[in-house]
Image (cartoon, rainbow, N blue to C red):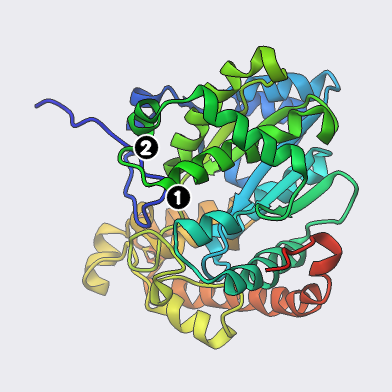
Amino acid sequence: MEEKPVRLDPWASAVKLEYDKLFRYFGIKPFQEVLPRVSQVFGDPLHLMRRGVIFGHRDYDKILEAYKSGERVALVTGFMPSGKFHFGHKMVADQIIYYQKLGFEIFIVIADAEAYAVRKLDRKKVIEIGLYEYVANLIALGLEKNKHTHIYFQTNYEKPYYRLIQMFSRKITMAEMEAIYGDLEPGKVVAALTQAADILHPQLEYFGGFKYVVVPVGADQDPHIRFTRDIADRFENELGLRRPASTYHRFQTGLDGNKMSSSRPDYTIFLSDPVDVAVRKLKRALTGGRATVEEQRRLGGVPENCTIYEFYVYHLLQDDRELARIYSECKEGRLLCGPDKQYAAELLAKFLEEHQRRLEKARDRVLDYVEPPEF
Ligand code: SF4
């Protein structure tokens, strides 16, 4: 049977992806191939790298080479402030902090223009969420304030950044954009051009000159990467821009097995959820357990289809041996979902209690990190 072509929509809220198709259709390479080199160049890989949550890349080998030879390297990433900060966002935060510790320059965009134009949200609300959810949670998770870390709102930045958005519009046609994104309305055209400026502006002289850039994204965001790489090619001579590298991570699954998203609060755990609420949500989560205890003992569970196990892999367990123990005991039917959920709930509660203590203090410090737009 002929395989249906794949088109990714970076603005869709719940995308189900078959990750292997991304390798075939879009030329994304398996991250496993560069993992040994990551250990040599960076030292310990991030747990998300080791465990295959970060599964793909484009040109990551160039980032490793640049870092190894002492050239300047930067990470660019962004958050759309359209809802509360959840564990899917934490996965990106963990990557930011990992690269910050390695000495990368960090650029974090709060995509308020996009939230206003594409998600049709109220400006005041968007700014508030950007500050007190996104920036505050990043600080609470360990983002340091230093001269190599830049956080900005899309509507409140330096002039050369806006100049890029204008310039990019000249060398791209609607047909090319629609080939990447599908049907487009004006808000999405501007959002795509703005994202390209977000990713490429750190290379301008005004922002310190050329540096190698890596962008960690969820796989559904690849259209922005492909679009931006095309633009970089077209402005190589005029502005000296080069293609960014990218990495791709799996989605955090919602507690019902679909995508975790702020718009589905019952199936999403927010880092500001009261601990008892978060624990209640977790205890209702879909597992890879069998219909009866007897079956589970006989056949074992299916951790690959279990949202609790995914929480261990992504967030709750740093120790690989402990993770391996849970995996094998589940598979062999020696672990049952009831007690295992209780264990996960205890780890979650401990994490949230500590995080929320830091979050409260972080909220008083957000204005040290970023200047919000006036309106
Ligand atoms: S025992 Fe744990 S890991 Fe296994 S299916 Fe149940 S909840 Fe998931």
Q: Nearer the viewer, residue 346 or 231?
A: 231
**Residue 75 place in picture, x, y as percent:** 71, 39
The response on whether ligand 1 sits within 8 Å of label 2 is: no
Q: CA distance from mark 1 to mark 2?
A: 13 Å
Image side of residue 16 versus residue 236, left or right: left
- Residue type at tag 1: Gly
Tell which circle, 1 or 2, labels the residue nearer the N-terminal end. Answer: 2
**Which residue is at 66% across, 33% downward?**
164
Amino acid identity at mark 2: Tyr
User: Which of the labelled discs sits on residue 348, or is there none?
Assistant: none
Q: Is residue 75 left or right of residue 246?
A: right
Residue 153, position as x, y percentages in the image: 69, 56
The residue furthest right is 147
Query: Badge 2: few (under 14), some or many (20 or more) residues near its Cα, within 10 Å?
Result: many
Q: Position of residue 146 (x, y in %)?
A: 89, 51
Task: Return the residue found at the far top.
Answer: 237
Q: Identify whether 302 is placed above or below 102.
A: below
User: Dividing the picture into quarters, in which one does residue 283 lie?
Assistant: bottom left
- Looking at the image, do the residues carrying marks 1 and 2 touch, with CB atoms under 8 Å apart? no
Q: Residue at x 68, y 29 (%)?
A: 38
> Is 236 located above or below residue 137 in the figure?
above
**x, y percentage for residue 336?**
37, 70
Q: Answer left or right for 276 relative to 164.
A: left
**In this orientation, which residue lies closer to the viewer: 227 or 135?**
227
Q: Dot 1: within a 10 Å radius of its alpha carbon, few (fewer than 14), some, or many (20 or more) residues?
A: some
What is the secondary structure assignment of the residue under circle 1? helix
Residue at left offset 65%, top offset 65%? 130
Q: Which mark is residue 187?
A: 1
**In terms of secondary structure, where does tag 2 sit?**
helix
230 relative to 182, above or below: above
Residue 153 can be seen in this image? yes
Res. 181 mark: 2
